[in-house]
Amino acid sequence: MKKEFLKSSNEQLKKFAEIVNGDKPLRKVTADEKLKVGVDLGTSSIVLTVLDSKDKIVYGAYEYDHAVQDGIVVNFMESVNILRRLKEKAEKVLGRELKTACGAIPPKTGEKSAKVVANVIEETGLLCTGVEDEPTAAAKFLRLSNGTVVDIGGGTTGISIFKDNKLIHVIDEATGGFHMTLVLGGRYKIKNDEAEKLKRNKDKESEVYAVIKPVVEKMAAIVQNMGVEIIDPVIVVGGATNFTEFTTTFSKELKRKVYKPLYPQFVTPLGIAMFDD
């Protein structure tokens, strides 16, 4: 795989990053055209994405949150309130109502988890058209027919392996960005909120990464020890991968090249919206 493989995805991600949470969409929309909406209820943030009928980016918004833990909604009304604000913000920017949305959950977290996500979406007035698994959504955005997607969010690591456009293996482990936060909190003897801010501080990245590197190595070990063949390319996505040395560590542990798109935290949310048909 060459880096050119991610060129199209990176161009889309760059455009999304420029307009997310802004006051203007990427383009104006008409009152009656089909819009596709994705809702990603993450452990550290909730992201709403809007695409047109051709899966081109229109708008998006997000808020940090603590309403989800290890991929499971633990504070229903907080999730609803945040999503309602994001929906209202998007509708104001777009100048029209959003009617449907697709959600997602970590792999193999069950029908109950999917039902809760659907209920959160519908509580805001949106019709939930489906609930997908997160790494599969990421693969759809990346247009990946063969390969391994490792989706590392705030609470979980989801791994999906694809061959000839078919999902052949999927697992989920409760290790993610929050575990990095816990390690930082323990190392510096600070509260989780302070540790989370420290983790996101780009000026402190080198110092922070030295502390949380063992967590990244554990994530790579999960992939290495799945007991099934890893199919190249291996692509890491999710907010917890937002460290410069992340792919270097993963590549060393897996003994193979590992790739990461630009703005990896937005890959899955955009892929989720592509399922809103």
Image (spheres, rainbow, N blue to C red):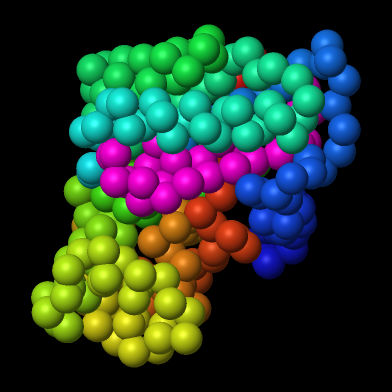
Check the image and report above or below for 189 versus 180.
below
Task: Give the left or right position of residue 98, taking residue 255 as reference.
Answer: right
Magenta segment, prevailing SS (helix, strand or loop): strand
Q: 34 left or right of 249?
A: right
| Left or right position of 4 against 144 | right
Q: Is residue 123 left or right of residue 137?
A: left
Looking at this view, is 41 or 92 the one in front?
92
Quadrant that contains the C terminus = top right
Q: Vertically, is 100 above or below 94?
A: above
- Residue 119 locus on image (x, y percent): 36, 15
Name the residue located 67 percent from the left edge and 56 percent from the top edge. 17
Give whichever of 237, 204 is nearer the camera. 204
**In terms of image quadrants, where is residue 82?**
top left
Instruction: Tell me which corner region of the image, top left, top right, bottom left or bottom right, holds residue 254.
Output: bottom left
Task: Using the image as rendered, state which of residue 50 and residue 245 is in the foreground.
Answer: 50
For residue 141, above or below residue 105: below
Relative image position of residue 231 (x, y in whole percent): 45, 52
User: Is 110 a magenta residue?
Assistant: no
Residue 55 in sight: no
Q: Residue at position x 60%, y 28% from top?
A: 88
Residue at the extreme bottom: 207
User: What is the span of residues highlighted in magenta in the rendered image?
Assistant: 41-68
Q: Is residue 253 above or below residue 168?
A: below
* Residue 78 percent location from the top left of the image: 33, 33
x%, y% of residue 62? 53, 45
Q: Do we see residue 40 in this rendering? A: yes
